Image (cartoon, grey):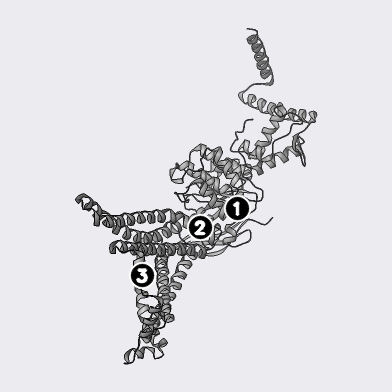
């Protein structure tokens, strides 16, 4: 099957800083991939390159064989690590917005998830607690039937129950024709949900393997192995 | 079913063990229809691909079979289940004996302990 | 895609501008009423009240004007360059549609605000003059009279309308240029990682100076080029009104072309910097 995300000698430079250094990557549909690395390792940069918010300094990044652009953006569903929705809008308006711009947005799916959490459709973003807002953002992103889901630090800074909800939602929305890339530094919590992991450090890919292979080869969890690899 | 996992073993093999245990103990009855891969994965809190791999392994071992349109089922072959039960039991026995030997008990000593335990349990239920 | 962006943009800005228009209309009505009443009633306390209404009215007009400008700037900054940019720039659309949606909507609000204010002042003038609308129209010269007046001066109706239209076009173009001036400054300033606002202000000032400078320079170059002896006419004795109008149209045209060029350059600066150097926090 054609990879949904490919990086070929991808580099990104900010002034003097080399955020990504000749990254080679290939991710197949149907995989849930963890992008793991310390802060500042280049995780967010890679994700931003994939969703078109940044342009490469050199090399290539392809989404389903295309360069990032309006076409690729229509099949990529992105959850940033910050509040990015207009806070004057309410849930219904946001659903209309998403449905308007994204043909793959499933309103019924979103409605169901919101109802299950007891989130009213006329609630405005600015009235919501941080946790509720993050759940709404996740629901909107996961209600799209996209080819590539990019989740930037989806579980950092939320309570454990919300964390479980987020991981459950990722499993529940699993689609063998789509790939999920989630970046995090909270590895132990997400290991069970991941197929593959990518270790990234200082802009370089250090390791790309499956969770089960790491456990089988090293007799330790991915979290444990990560600590070994990234020991200061 | 208990879905807590050890962190040092591959998840799929732990899934195989847990589902196998369910079948052996009768929690999953012979011929019973299993939930879909996605539902099982959700229940277990694991990646659907991993669950799929585990179920495929169980198919290979003959404890589970799949019918294209109807889904996956526990085998109806009771002998197969018995065989698996015996295999797991043997493994547990080996582990047990190994652990007891480490404590310094001989085979005779272990048998004596077991007999003592049995008599004590009978006395307890009598009272 | 542009249509959807426009819809969303109008919704987001309308929720601020429409109430402002509402308040302005209410203030103008209050003012009109108070002007009519103050002629008939003479109660000291009421006078003070009417005075306040008058002040509020003037403040309201100024505020509405300022608000339409500030909203234009703030909306672009917040929606494109702030956290909302994460949403906008990952929509399946290109940077041109995004910029045009902002441009068109800002322009429309600037236009509407000014039209509304003009209308309000027109009707307020009525209140003061205390003559009815019909009276005014009766006093206006008829169509035939107007044409005769113009003929005596040597101008055709067509020429006058041409001048008016050109003036209107230039005004509209100026509105567009103002918006782009701000957008380009913000987009360029945002390319830097630190002190983005400082850079934006610097770009704004820089762009102002550059284009005023270029405007003067190009003006001096363009006029002779388009001249064809028309300007000479001004210095001869036989210069008629027609000739003067022609020269005015010439000068305005030159200014318009420069303004157009400025808009194009600023548009490119905006879109290119957003496309290549987007640097969301």
Q: Which residue is mark 1?
A: A148
Counting other residues with Cα less than 10 Å from the Cα at mark 3, is it few (<14), some (14-19), or many (20 or more)? few
In the displayed orientation, state which residue is furthest to the top: B127
Q: Which residue is mark 3?
A: C138
Residue at 38 percent across and 54 percent down: it is C22
Residue C111's place in the image compared with B116, above or below, is below
- Residue B43: quarter of image: top right
Q: Chain of mark 1?
A: A
Q: Say which of marks 3 and 1 sits in front.
A: 3
Residue C206's place in the image compared with C98, above or below, is below
- Residue B126: quarter of image: top right
Residue B44's place in the image compared with A89, above or below, is above
Label 3 sits on a secondary structure element that is helix
Asked if disc 2 and disc 3 are in contact, CB closer than 8 Å, the reply is no
Residue at 52 percent across and 53 percent down: it is A43
Q: Say which of marks 2 and 3 sits in front.
A: 3
Asked if disc 3 and disc 1 are in contact, CB closer than 8 Å, the reply is no
| Residue C258 seen in render | no
Label 1 sits on a secondary structure element that is strand
Counting other residues with Cα less than 10 Å from the Cα at mark 2, is it few (<14), some (14-19), or many (20 or more)? few
- Residue C156: percent from the left, percent from the top? 41, 83
């Amino acid at each position: 099957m054609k990879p949904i995300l490919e990086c070929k000698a991808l580099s990104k430079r900010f002034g003097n800083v080399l955020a990504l250094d000749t990254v080679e990557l290939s991710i197949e549909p149907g995989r849930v991939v963890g992008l793991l690395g310390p802060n500042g390792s280049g995780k967010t940069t890679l994700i931003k390159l994939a969703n078109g918010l940044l342009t490469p300094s050199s090399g290539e990044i392809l989404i389903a064989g295309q360069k990032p652009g309006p076409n690729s953006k229509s099949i990529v569903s992105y959850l940033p690590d910050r509040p990015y929705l207009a806070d004057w809008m309410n849930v219904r308006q946001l659903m209309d917005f998403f449905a308007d711009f994204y043909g793959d947005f499933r309103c019924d799916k979103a409605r169901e998830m919101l109802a299950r959490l007891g989130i009213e459709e006329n609630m405005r973003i600015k009235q919501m607690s941080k946790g509720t807002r993050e759940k709404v953002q996740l629901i909107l992103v996961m209600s799209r039937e996209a080819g590539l889901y990019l989740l930037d630090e989806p579980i950092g800074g939320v309570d454990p129950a919300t964390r479980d909800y987020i991981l459950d939602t990722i499993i529940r929305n699993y689609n063998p024709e789509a790939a999920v890339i989630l970046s995090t530094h909270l590895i132990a919590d997400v290991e069970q949900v991941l197929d593959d992991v990518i270790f990234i450090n200082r802009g370089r890919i250090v390791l790309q393997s499956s969770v089960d292979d790491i456990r089988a080869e090293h007799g330790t969890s991915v979290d444990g192995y990560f600590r070994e690899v990234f020991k200061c | 079913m208990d879905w807590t996992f050890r962190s040092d073993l591959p998840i799929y093999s732990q899934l195989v063990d847990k589902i196998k245990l369910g079948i052996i103990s009768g929690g999953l009855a012979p011929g019973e229809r299993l939930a879909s891969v996605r539902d099982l994965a959700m229940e277990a809190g694991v990646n659907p691909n991993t669950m799929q791999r585990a179920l495929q392994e169980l198919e290979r071992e003959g404890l589970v079979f799949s019918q294209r349109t109807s889904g996956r089922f526990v085998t109806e072959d009771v002998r197969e289940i018995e065989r698996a039960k015996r295999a797991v039991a043997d493994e547990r026995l080996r582990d047990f004996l190994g652990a007891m030997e480490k404590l310094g008990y001989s085979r005779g000593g272990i048998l004596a302990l077991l007999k003592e335990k049995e008599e004590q349990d009978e006395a307890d239920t009598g009272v | 895609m542009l249509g959807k962006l426009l819809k969303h943009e109008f919704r987001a800005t309308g929720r601020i501008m429409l109430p402002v228009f509402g308040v302005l209309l209410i203030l103008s009505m209050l003012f009109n009423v108070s002007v009519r009443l103050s002629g008939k009633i003479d109660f000291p306390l009421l006078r003070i009240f009417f005075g306040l209404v008058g002040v509020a009215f003037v403040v309201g007009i100024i505020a509405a004007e300022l608000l339409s400008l500030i909203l234009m700037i703030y909306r672009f900054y917040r929606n494109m360059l702030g956290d909302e940019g994460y949403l906008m720039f990952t929509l399946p659309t290109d940077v041109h549609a995004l910029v045009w949606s902002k441009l068109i909507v800002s322009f429309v609000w600037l236009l509407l605000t000014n039209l509304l204010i003009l209308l309000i002042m027109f009707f307020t003038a009525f209140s003061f003059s205390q003559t009815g609308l019909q009276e005014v129209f009766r006093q206006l010269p008829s169509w035939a009279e107007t044409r005769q007046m113009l003929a005596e001066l040597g101008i055709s109706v067509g020429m006058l309308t041409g001048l008016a239209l050109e003036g209107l076009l230039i005004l509209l173009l100026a509105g567009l240029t103002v918006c782009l001036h701000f957008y380009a400054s913000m987009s360029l300033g945002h390319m830097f990682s630190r002190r983005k606002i400082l850079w934006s202000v610097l770009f704004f000032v820089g762009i102002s100076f550059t284009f005023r400078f270029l405007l003067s320079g190009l003006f001096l170059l363009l006029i002779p080029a388009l001249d064809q002896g028309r300007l000479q006419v001004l210095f001869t004795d036989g210069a008629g009104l027609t000739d003067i109008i022609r020269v005015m149209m010439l000068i305005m045209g030159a200014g318009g072309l420069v303004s157009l060029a400025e808009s194009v350059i600023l548009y490119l600066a905006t879109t290119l910097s957003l496309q290549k150097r987007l640097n969301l926090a």
